[in-house]
């Protein structure tokens, strides 16, 4: 057994500084397009496990007096109020109905009518008098969650390892990687998990079947004290435009889909903000008209890397990519973890665990074969 394990992370924008940190955070294991989402139960259960780890790490920090109670209250990791998906067109009705009949044990789906839905969200409007309520679904503060996970990794690194275990080291370098030759050091393995920026690496350019899509999220606030706030216990809303509830007077509204964009900046121009808000409000108001009384206080953007559509849905791209980097596969040194798209919050935990096992074992066969099929189209398999 090796006596030392060192993990170096290179990230230009910091923890949660990319698209992952601005995600809406609506977490559930279902899709209106695919019956029984691929490996949904495994991914859901691992997501719950990692959420507990992130929450526990932040709680320990609070107890040490390094983070105030007010800070924790203002930016919780998770809001446990469920998610409501109004039916706005008949296309997805049959699939979601089947999901409701075959739901995962710890994430139920209930079919409800407009009266019952309005008990959850007053003033709600259901175009087809039908909605799917997921009371166990979650609303994650993605930035806090990622910070909590990294803090947990630091805690694990700093803990005294049990007898016979490896010494551990974790380093974070806030540095841009424009080419894999920028990475110096005698690494046993390199994992490329740059999101959309993986497409910009010269070694990977033109070789990944990913589609770029920029999304804008509008921050909404109810500034008029005379108007009724959103219910403290009300679920978030997932429709053509989603409403991720932060608290009774703050909601994030998203998201736009600007295909083929290569703009990975978080910054949103005034014109972009105005156009995006207009489009999103039109969709959101069709199910929650009261959102028109809220005020836009800002906007943020992220560049998604969307994977190709398969018979199992849109699945991430994983696998050894030595062929692209050094021209042949020898020791499985270079690995790819990309294309998590709009479901990264669900997929990342379980797939990250599998990828870590594959990297340590230098055995790609430990990965689900559905996630390495993308190489066939690129002629590398």
Image (spheres, rainbow, N blue to C red):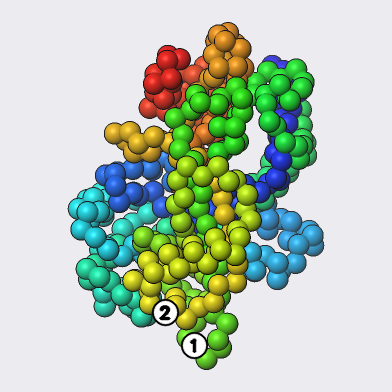
- For marks 1 and 2, the one nearer the N-term is 1
- Please tell me which residue lies in front, 14 or 84: 14
Disc 2 is placed on an element classified as: helix
- Please tell me which residue lies in front, 115 or 56: 115
Question: Taking 285 as reference, is 352 left or right?
Answer: right
Please tell me whether residue 279 is drawn above or below residue 196 in the rendered image: below
Residue named by callout 2: 290
- Please tell me which residue lies in front, 90 or 107: 90
Q: Where does the image place residue 83, in percent across and percent down from the top left?
A: 40, 63
Question: Taking 264 as reference, is 253 left or right?
Answer: left
* Quarter containing the N terminus: top right
The quadrant holding residue 43 is top left
Query: Residue 227 — which label?
Result: 1
Q: Is residue 326 visible?
A: yes
Q: Residue at 43% across / 36% down in the picture? A: 307
* Crowdedness near tag 2: few (<14), some (14–19) or many (≥20) residues, C-alpha within 10 Å: some
């Amino acid at each position: 057994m090796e006596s030392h394990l060192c993990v170096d992370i290179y990230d230009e924008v910091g923890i949660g500084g990319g698209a992952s940190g601005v995600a809406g955070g609506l977490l559930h294991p279902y899709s209106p397009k695919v019956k029984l989402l691929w490996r949904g139960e495994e991914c859901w259960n691992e997501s719950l496990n990692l959420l507990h780890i992130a929450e526990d790490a932040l709680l320990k920090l609070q107890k040490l007096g390094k983070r105030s109670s007010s800070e924790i209250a203002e930016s919780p990791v998770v809001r446990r109020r469920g998610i409501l998906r109004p039916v706005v067109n008949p296309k997805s009705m049959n699939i979601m109905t089947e999901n409701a009949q075959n739901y995962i044990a710890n994430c139920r789906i209930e079919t409800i009518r407009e009266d019952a839905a309005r008990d959850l969200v007053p003033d709600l409007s259901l175009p087809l008098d039908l909605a799917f309520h997921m009371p166990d679904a979650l609303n994650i503060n993605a930035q806090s969650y990622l910070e909590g996970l990294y803090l947990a990794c630091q805690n694990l690194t700093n803990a005294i390892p049990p007898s016979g275990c490896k010494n551990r080291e974790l380093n974070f370098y806030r540095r841009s990687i424009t080419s894999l030759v920028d990475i110096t050091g005698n690494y046993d393995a390199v994992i490329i998990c740059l999101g959309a920026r993986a497409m910009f690496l010269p070694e990977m350019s033109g070789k990944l079947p990913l589609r770029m899509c920029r999304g804008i999220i509008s921050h909404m606030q109810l500034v008029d004290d005379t108007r009724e706030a959103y219910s403290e216990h009300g679920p978030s809303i997932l429709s053509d435009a989603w409403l991720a509830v932060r608290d009774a007077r703050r909601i994030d509204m998203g998201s736009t889909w600007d295909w083929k964009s290569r703009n990975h900046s978080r910054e949103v121009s005034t014109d972009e903000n105005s156009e995006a808000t207009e489009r999103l409000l039109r969709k959101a108001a069709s199910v929650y008209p009261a959102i028109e009384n809220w005020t836009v206080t800002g906007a943020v953007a992220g560049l998604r890397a969307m994977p190709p559509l398969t018979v199992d849905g849109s699945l991430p791209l994983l696998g050894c990519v030595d062929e692209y980097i050094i021209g042949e596969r020898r020791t499985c040194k270079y690995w790819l973890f990309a294309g998590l798209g709009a479901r990264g919050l669900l997929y990342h935990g379980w797939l990250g665990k599998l990828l870590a096992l594959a990297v340590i074992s230098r055995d790609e066969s430990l990965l689900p074969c559905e996630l390495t099929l993308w190489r066939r189209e690129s002629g590398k398999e």
